[in-house]
Amino acid sequence: MKKIPVLEVFGPTIQGEGMVAGQKTMFVRTAGCDYRCSWCDSAFTWDGSQKPRMLTAEDVAEELDELAPNNYGHITISGGNPALHAGIGGLVALMAERGVGTAVETQGSVWQDWMLEVDEVTVSPKPPSSNMTTDWEQLDHYMNALGARETKRHSLKVVIFNETDLAYAKTVHFRYPNVPFYLQVGNDDLSTADDLKLRDRLLASYEWLVEQAASDPDWNQARVLPQIHALLWGNKQGV
Amino acid sequence: MKKIPVLEVFGPTIQGEGMVAGQKTMFVRTAGCDYRCSWCDSAFTWDGSQKPRMLTAEDVAEELDELAPNNYGHITISGGNPALHAGIGGLVALMAERGVGTAVETQGSVWQDWMLEVDEVTVSPKPPSSNMTTDWEQLDHYMNALGARETKRHSLKVVIFNETDLAYAKTVHFRYPNVPFYLQVGNDDLSTADDLKLRDRLLASYEWLVEQAASDPDWNQARVLPQIHALLWGNKQGV
Ligand code: SF4
Ligand code: SF4
């Protein structure tokens, strides 16, 4: 069985973002990313500062059970880019067997067939402020494959730091008009430990983003959300 | 055509709560409620302090178009209890014709057949702290009727002020285990104009609620959300 490079397993807590915002969940964070976003809020998954452990799906399940015995019904697999790891397929299947819901977030740059079995897939292409470049053909492949599913759900989410990012987000939204679309406030101060200051700053950015969406008909179908966990816990890791 | 007692029409803004949190939307707020919740955050809809205008569905559509020409694709009908008004059926039909999505929120005490045509119905039974009593048979009727729909969605949401409310919410969740369930933080300071103080208070309550959900297996499937608009705009009306 293929192993998964795991950086952290934590919870139960709530999902702070996107299509399942508020959901009680456990987090499994994998190491490694094919991107290097300028504002990556989990750079520790790829900058060498933290070492992953190589775990099987069963190892991960055991850890989840130890952390939260009978106390979870949903897990979120995040990264880094979890789509780098074939081994996650085993974890998704194991959770499905147990009736535990699964969510994953990826930028949509690398495909894995296990993606089809995930209950909620958030595809989050990165806007210009990240300094990354979108592979549109690969993104088309993602949207086609996910769109062919019948009972499971997916969405697009773009993190916004400025107006150029918003224009990019619009290109994404218009390319896949039938996919639920989320605009999310970017966190531009990843180092502060002053949670209250960060909270005010994030809410001010969120208000700006709401105003942009409210004043532009192109966003009539969009949903605009803050990172709820950052409002609560600031930049802390593992909550 | 039956008229609708309308207290305010505003937007575009975002939906701050529940199953479509973050959605860009217009609000149509109707007057009148069959309840008198102790902590009602829209008591002005029924305490006689503000006078409704009697409008047809076309009048309301015209007002929406004036406020936001081509700049909305979703409306939220709230109250008070919108389910008191048969005339809302015309508004829901008119919006559907135009391809505009509709959401409604009600405590589930009064049924209207137009409820079946609403894209997203939030049923929000009131916990003990409201001093109201739930009519479970009527709530069963709601859940059966809404559950029989195929493409439109519904959810349950309970506002929580204390542990007794949480126990009540659990009764609701377990009675309708397959209905998406939201726990929402109650706002216990409806009069303050100090938005920053309110923000901190609401986030502290939200953190408490997250902890309750995280530590109790009965909430494994629940979603826990704050009132995002209250974090942004405090107790202001019409945003
Ligand atoms: S894709 Fe995500 S994990 Fe990878 S560098 Fe960008 S923000 Fe970080
Ligand atoms: S049901 Fe809603 S509008 Fe009616 S009194 Fe209670 S909180 Fe207020």
Image (tube, coloured by chain):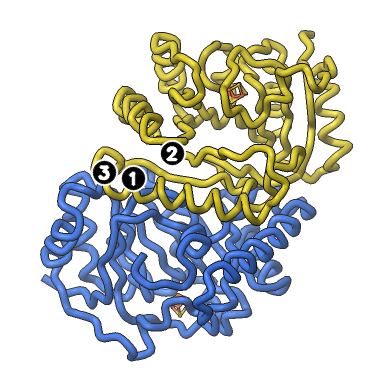
Chain colours: A yellow, B blue
Total labels: the figure holds 3
Element carrying mark 2: strand
Residue B223 drawn at (x, y percent): 60, 51
Ligand 2 is found in which quarter of the picture? bottom left
Which of the labelled discs sits on residue A181, or is there none? none
- The amino acid type, in three-letter code, at marker 1 is Ala
Disc 2/disc 1 C-alpha distance (Å): 9 Å
| B185 left or right of B112 in image | right
User: Quick check: do tags 1 and 3 share a chain?
Assistant: yes
Residue A76 drawn at (x, y percent): 66, 33
Q: Is residue B221 above or below residue B225?
A: above
Q: Is residue B3 above or below residue A5?
A: below
Dot 2: few (<14), some (14–19), or many (≥20) neighbours within 10 Å?
Answer: many
Which of the labelled discs sits on residue A183, or is there none? 2
What residue does disc 1 label?
A213
Q: Chain of mark 2?
A: A
